Image: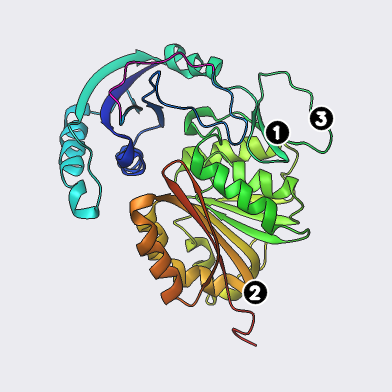
Amino acid sequence: MRWHEITVLATESSQEMVTHYLTELGAGGVSVEEAWSEDKPRNTTYGEVYDTPLNDIRPGYAVFKAYFSEDIEMEPIAVQLKALLEGLPEFGYDAGEFTIELGDVHEDDWADAWKQYFKPIAITERLTIKPTWEEYTPSGDELIIEIDPGMAFGTGAHATTALCLKALEHAIKGGEQIIDVGTGSGVLAIGAMKLGASKVLALDLDPVAVKCAQENIELNGYEKEVEVRLSDLLGVLHESADPATATVNSVTPPVDLVVANILAEIILLFIADVMEVLKPGGIYITSGIYKNKEMIVEAGLLASGFEIIDVLRQEEWVAFVAGKPKGDGQ
């Protein structure tokens, strides 16, 4: 099978918006390669393994490759994407001197080639992500998350995912019911179970991600504890008259913790819904926030009644750990 490939060169700071737009336009998978140079230090805070050779991508820029079914007309997609990227400044982003190129590729050429660069990665003190095709022997109390990202391209190595896993490691004490919004390849849902959660409801708007997450959850043996559902944010809970008491197979709100690794703009859309499905004293972990959006997300959380417990940062990304007041609803 052949796929249409669209290659975008744009600023690293616009990364979350570029990937979001490509997905919204129908991409079946998106990969990102950031610029490296001799004088740019590589972050090894969480034990990342870097096998990738240095590239010649313009400093401060990244290359995005997205893949579309061969029956899709690509010229209109490119036109729409150009208009969206040109409009980024009104949202506080800048794609810079971006370029968009169209091409075609056979599935075998891209489906497996990237795997040579995905090695076991120690994300936190206890959690290590391991691709299914790599041999690895854990040591001590190391917890292994087995992943095959598939077309969702979610390896868990991105700073936003690492921040969420670090926050989960500190927040989970054991037995929690959790909702993972925007689960992607299921890394956070699996990590939560490894850390001691009792049940997880994993939600995503992308059917490809839902399929990928389900497969990864089964790889890790959590198909009975983790339910994956196609849902627009917390929409699946609104199928009930009262989302705060809705029941799905996995969890029964109000829950102990909600985690969301998504766009800052999307986070702002459903903060009140998260407050509604959390128990008093419940925790909301949210990431996917580029540094220029930190203040507006913090303001949104505070305006909805959350208390900021912690702010975590890695590279240019921010994650919030927020709490629902214990006295709320009592």
Residue 37 or residue 26, whichever sits in front: 37
Pointer 3: what residue? Answer: 139
User: Of callouts 1 and 2, which one flags the residue occurring earlier in the amino acid sequence?
Assistant: 1
Q: Which numbered disc covers residue 219?
A: 1
Residue 54 located within the stretch drawn in magenta: yes
Q: Which numbered disc covers residue 281?
A: 2
Q: Eyeballing the image, is 153 above or below 258?
A: above
Give SS at disc 3.
loop
Please report the residue visible at 55 percent of the width from the left and 14 percent of the height from the top: 116
Q: How is the image coloured?
A: rainbow
Q: Which residue ends up furthest to the bottom in the rendered image?
A: 330
Magenta: predominant secondary structure element? loop
Q: Is residue 7 left or right of residue 80?
A: right
User: Of callouts 3 and 1, which one flags the residue occurring earlier in the amino acid sequence?
Assistant: 3
Which segment is the magenta one? Answer: 51-59
User: Which amino acid does the dot numbered 3 rest on?
Assistant: Ser
Q: Eyeballing the image, is 159 above or below 243?
A: above
Looking at the rendered image, the disc whose residue lies closer to the viewer, 3 or 1, is: 3
Residue 188, percent across and down?
Answer: 61, 46
